[in-house]
Amino acid sequence: MATAEYTMQQVGEHTTEGDTWIAIDGKVYDVSKFGKVHPGGAGILRLYAGKDATKEFFGMHTAAVLGKTGAKLVKGTIAGSKGGELQASADKHNIDAAPYGEPSAWMGWNSPYYNESHKRFRTNVRAFIEDEIRPEADDNEEDGDHPAIEVYQAMGKCGYLAARIGKDVMPALNMIPGIDLEGGLGLKPAEFDHFHELIAHEEMGRMSQPSYADGLGAGFTIGLPPVLHFAPPHVRDVVVPEVISGNKRICLAISEPAAGSDVGGMLTTASKSPDGKHYIVNGIKKWITNGMFADYFVTAVRTGEGSKGISMLFISRDMGVETKAIKTTYSSCAGTALVIFDNVKVPVENLMGLNNKGKEGQGFACIMYNFNHERWMIIACFLASCRVIISDCFKWATQRMAFGKPLIQQPVLRQKLARMAGAVESAHALMELVTYQMDTMPYAEQAVKLGGPIALLKFQSTRAGTLVADEGVQMFGGRGITRTGMGKNIEKFQKTYKYASILGGSEEVLADLAIRQGMSGAAMRAKL
């Protein structure tokens, strides 16, 4: 590591084409040869030769550029400067210093929900993601490759997969070899609550690689809870350890070409074989996240008429399931699939139901119970990704000079920041309130009482995200529609924010559900 110190006067002595130095963020860079490969050409580098170009650099680049490219060009530091202070503030291992870039409990506010174990857990999960997941995530998001099984296994080993399922799985963790939550992420299973799970989802959302993040967890977090709560013991006790250790992958197969939010409109059928030992499944499921590489499919099927004729089956790929890739707006590394069941034979013992007892006609109830956790998970990830955009906008507004002053000095842009921050903060406050109810209510009570509030939360959050996407692009201008550079997070977000508005139930359906659930019982007898 370079340790030499230079004065700005010494830097100013290197201004020729073959001998060009510049200073940025307290460090001295020799860019003499770099000009040949600089994307903007050598001319712009010569323009700042011998000068401190910190303000100009951060007006056009992220700190990550210095860490990645600049490390090879460092000559030393400016005398009296620590060097790299701005770069350190942008280190993704750290708590984000930008306003509203983190939940309020991490911005110096008091909170009734979090303790030291939550703060320690966030720090450890963030480090794990940055060190173990992000290197592959950045490449795969661009290339469309599915997450490697080794990444799943690493998440399983440290307990990160288990942490995304909730505290109901924690008692079984000590019986699963090779999983060490305390050693891996510094948390005892007995300490775990739904706020730890909230943090686990938020940190995945902060990665800002939406397709890869869904590849690592969307199918898992909505497919495994039904096994835990509704699968018969001979399935549950085998599959849960396999999946939370990362050795097997799972997805939830409900949506169909003719049935999205209208779950009751599904057409996939399951008829018993003549000997009564199998269900013969025929039909198609569509938009199934992780379906391309899943080993197991938790599948809604029709065994009768109406909503009471819906059942749930546990089906493995080796029973004859076929999958075909579906290309959607984001990268294909999420493994979004068309899942085809053509006379697939499923043992009748794989029928799922309430209280882990297989029973026909209970599929609709199982789906509705599971929707609460699915929707809550989606919003935990989504609001965290919204915060990344707000943080980027604040940083951009302080770095970018326009009309002779930083953007942050323009009242119209401060209004945009206020609208974004206000929408996300209010939605997050409801998120924490709902999470507290989850943490203090038994699973069955949650299923009855939280459907409407979680639907309202999802509606409010995705409306907030719509605002964030719109205002964020406007603040970044051309960079907000450019796939690389300072606006790359904004560009990805504005293309993919609608996923949260649709998956797990559309905004319109959930808004209606929230009101319908509220307007029942005593509420309908209220008079002015």
Image: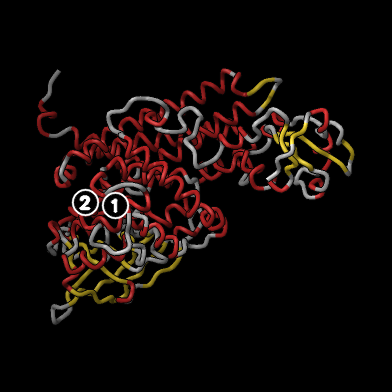
The amino acid beneath tag 2 is Asp
Q: Position of residue 415 (x, y in %)?
A: 51, 21
Crowd band around label 2 with a 10 angstrom C-alpha radius: few (<14), some (14–19), many (20+): some
Residue at numbered disc 2 = 168
| Residue 427 point in image, percent of width and height | 35, 32
Q: Residue at x 78, y 50 (%)?
A: 37
Identify the disc placed on residue 78: none
**Residue designated by label 1:** 165
Answer with the quarter of the image where residue 358 lies: bottom left
Residue in the foreground of this view, choosing between 61 and 265: 61
Q: Is residue 52 left or right of residue 129?
A: right
Q: Residue at x 43, y 33 (%)?
A: 102
> In the picture shown, does residue 110 fall above or below 61?
above
* Residue at (16% x, 64% y) in the render: 304
Q: Secondary structure at mark 2?
A: helix
Horizontal and vertical percent for residue 255? 32, 57
Residue 369 image position (x, y, % from top left): 21, 49
Left or right: 271 as drawn, with respect to 117: left
Q: Residue at x 36, y 66 (%)?
A: 247
Number of other residues with Cα within 10 Å of mark 1, as a class: few under 14, some 14 to 19, many 20 or more: many
Quadrant in the picture for residue 251: bottom left
- Seen from the viewer's position, the closer of residues 195 and 375 is 195
Say what amino acid the circle numbered 1 marks: Ile
Q: Is residue 299 visible?
A: no
Q: Name, please, the residue furthest toward the bottom.
A: 275
Q: Are marks 1 and 2 in contact (CB under 8 Å)?
A: yes
Describe the element under mark 1 as helix, strand or loop: loop
Q: CA distance from mark 1 to mark 2?
A: 8 Å
Classify 78 as above or below 159: above
Left or right of 216: which side holds 521? left
**Numbered circles on residues, count:** 2
Indicate the colouring scheme. secondary structure
